[in-house]
Image (tube, coloured by chain):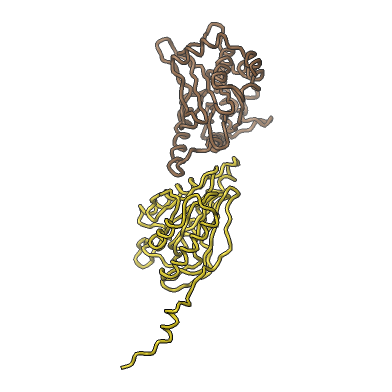
Amino acid sequence: MLKHLYDTDCVTWSPQGKLFQVEYAMEAVKQGSICLGLKSNDFVVLCSLKRQPSELAGYQEKQFKIDDHMAIAIAGLTADARVLCKYMRTECLEYKYTYESHHPVGRLVFKVAEKSQHKTQSGAKRPYGVGLLVAGIDPNGVHLFETCPSGNYYEYKCQAIGSRSQAARTYFESWFHLFEKSTLEQLILHGLSALKKAIMEDEELNEKNVEVGILGKNQKFIHLNAQELKDYIVKLETFNANTQIQQE
Amino acid sequence: MIFNSEISGQQQHTTSPVVTGGSVIALVYNGGVIVGTDTLCSYGSMAAFKNVQKIAQISKNTIYASSGEYSDFQQVVKELAKIDRSALQYDDGVHPSPKDYGNFLARLSYKKRCKINPLYLQNVIAGFHNGERYLGLIDIYGTYLESNFITTGFASYFCKAIISNYWNENCTLDQAKQVIRECFKVLFCRDCRAHDVIQLAYVDAQGAHIEESERVETKWDFNGFKSRANEKLHTQ
């Protein structure tokens, strides 16, 4: 009940040292449908579950290419995500125009985080209601970052955000030690396995509601097409992380 | 660089340089890249400042030299250093490669050219990154060229023959140094704004090395000069 005394705007702290508006914004991320990312030494894979508002509607895209070497997966308010996506694309284009090389990934995530933080320190603004998983390749290697409405950002080996993402994270905790040396195919199957843990009982993964994007050191960001998705979902039936250990 | 004339109230543009530096010669060799300049800044035809370092280290593996207006050279060094510091700001350990600097300078030069207020320079960026040698030429208009060898100023006229006869892209460091010294020898003889004290700098896998200035060998004791000096004066 006391919460309501301190949650009117971003410029009010609670006695416990919380900014409730920012926390509420992070709730919006948790309400979005799940998206996850995982990386090996050479590849990053993004998997997401697309929502269909109604039978008449299409499925909402969750992954966006920022540049050849970078892509994001979103969870939360799609409209806010579009703003950040446009900002990131513009920054990459400007960097490329000036330096003829790719924007370092960590730096762009830092810029997004700075922008997000700015929205948490004003009486007239609200935080972005979207969390991003940023996959990118740069001279420092293969990266996967998560950004929050709070303006924090973290680098991960693998991460899942959105609705029921804890189930996917539990899967990751058991198997992430295999990811570094996984092949691309194994990585995709791990991602889909984690995604499968996070869907409802009456749902199933199919090529319409699953989105998989891959990015590699010599691989520009691409989405898997419908046929490839179908094939992987079939392979998922026989995929078992245990077999990967035996091979190694 | 942009002067507001209080008399006319008009913005003025740099139309001619005042304190200028001479030719720059840059070559690749088997282990990296090497750049040579002389150490003179001329004030028109006066050899005003004879001990000037015209090669700057921009980052661990990149060096920059230019011929033309020396104050513009100093300004460019500041601009490029700003970029290198950005790595500190973002805490990510990612430093611009020599090519990034080259392209940035090209964009900067082009922007100023479009405003008819150029950086009065022929710029050379030299570096060694990820095992690859880099030499970039950026001219006063913002034209960007990468090459195995670069000459600016009078060196483009006098030294290309020497370079093509005595240098190849896989020569040793000492061979490349000798070629550059020979070039500056010729330049001192033929270019009125050249000087016989030069400075060499090279970048290899270990980083940038800027050497102490050295005097090129010159020979003046030709018989022709000696006997000319002793010629009888022609009288009517």
Which residue is most to the top?
A: A202
Quarter residue A167 falls in: top right
The chain drawn in brown is A
Q: Is residue B207 visible?
A: yes
Which quarter of the image is occupied by the C terminus of chain A? Answer: top right
Most foreground residue, B8 or B156: B156
Q: Nearer the viewer, residue B126 or B85?
A: B126
Measuring 41% from the left and 69% from the top, which residue is drawn there?
B190
- Residue at 49% of width from left, 68% of height from top? B40
B34, B181: nearer the viewer: B181
Residue A137 at what x, y percent from top left? 53, 32
The answer to whether residue A123 is visible is no
Q: Which residue reaches farthest left?
A: B236
The number of numbered discs placed on residues in the rendered structure image is 0
Q: Quadrant of the N terminus of chain A?
A: top right
Extreme residue toward the right, this view: A16
Q: Residue A44's x, y, as percent?
A: 54, 26
Please give the name of the residue rendered at 69% of the width and 29% of the height, measured from the top-left corner: A16
Instruction: Say above or below: A92 vs B217.
Output: above
User: Whole-percent x and y of residue B94?
Assistant: 57, 41
> Against A245, is A151 above or below?
below
Shown colour of chain B: yellow
Q: Residue at x 45, y 42 (%)?
A: A100
Q: Nearer the viewer, residue A12 or A172?
A: A172
Rendering coords of residue B236 (x, y %): 30, 93
Point out the residue furthest to the front here. Answer: B223
